Amino acid sequence: MKTIVLEEPGRFKYADTNPAENLQPNEALVKVHRIGICGTDFHAYRGNQPFFTYPRILGHELGVEVLSVGEEVTNVAVGDKCSVEPYLNKTQDQAVRRGYTNCGENLSVLGVHQDGGMRERFKLPAKYLHTSEKLTYEQLAVVEPLGIGCHAVNRANIQSDDLVLVVGAGPIGLATVIFATAQGAKTVVMDVNQDRLSFAQEVTNIHGTVVAGRDDTIDKLQEQFNGDLPTVVLDATGNQYSMAKALEYAAPAGRIVFVGLFRGDFSFHDPYFHKKELTLMASRNALSSDFKQIIRMMEEEQIDVSQWITHRSSFEEMVNEFDDWLKPETGVIKAVVSF
């Protein structure tokens, strides 16, 4: 079957693979129809994705069709359209037993720690499939990146009276915005890139934008909130300098959620942290309940991400176009590959 393999940093190749398709009782065989391309894929291609080995079949943002199911499977049936929850837990460890399946001690993410969906079909435990009778395969492929933002907002416990700052106007930041505004919270987006801020204003219901990295950034931020500071700051950049600034942006007794991952040590001035009595949290991946929430909201047309998908490619042409997607001038927000 047709497969794209990332052989090493900077080099894809088309291959013909034949993985085992004999199903265990709890498994489903799926056909891949759409693959979303995300920052993890770009990092892997550049050779700077942590916990990553080559060769690897990428692809964890997936819209798939169920081809067959094992005898114990009851949550999906042949022909179902599904989004894939790509966070597979290999053991029933403490985190999993407590319901934190997004951060299990032996978590294996499709397309990162094990081969993913850049192939015609593959099998997986059926419990990681989430069905929809209404959504298209393209919509189902973007449920996973939406899940990152959804989980971060749920983790922050955002309420309608919160003042929310989302730092970073990339796909994950935009996803975070969607669920913050859905809670009725006044939400502002900050980024160093004015074009991204303009795009965010165009496609989401944000209340304002602020350009980061200027001498008057905090003044401009307070202007957006009528002299106040945000009660919740969600940093989706994965940049240590931006993350450190979050402590300055947050209001006293505020909550900070690090959505983006920084590969290194992070430190802050503890007296300042205590002075404000801040709460600092990390947010990782998403839960099954987040996938169900997103699909319901999309089916009810509370979420429309059609404008997010700025680039499309066929499976046959993806390798030729991938390098261009890495260039800032290309303006990629979300690229989707079709089988």
Image: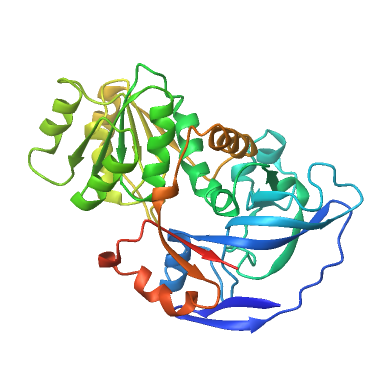
Measuring from the top left, give residue 320's x and y in whole percent. Answer: 44, 80
Up-down relation of residue 198 to residue 160 (above or below): below
Question: Which residue occupies 19% across, 21% down?
Answer: 228
In the rendered image, the quadrant that contains the N terminus is: bottom right
Q: Quadrant of residue 305?
A: top left
Question: Which residue occupies 72% across, 36% down?
Answer: 97
* Colour approach in the figure: rainbow
Query: Which residue occupies the extreme top position in the image?
Result: 161
Measuring from the top left, give residue 276's x and y in whole percent. Answer: 27, 23
Up-down relation of residue 1 to residue 337 (above or below): below
Up-down relation of residue 253 to residue 102 (above or below): above
Q: How many marks?
A: 0
Res. 166 visible in picture:
yes
Measuring from the top left, give residue 103's x and y in whole percent. Answer: 59, 44
Q: Is residue 253 left or right of residue 51?
A: left
Q: Is residue 271 left or right of residue 332?
A: left
> Front-most of 123 and 78?
78
Measuring from the top left, give residue 2's x and y in whole percent. Answer: 66, 77
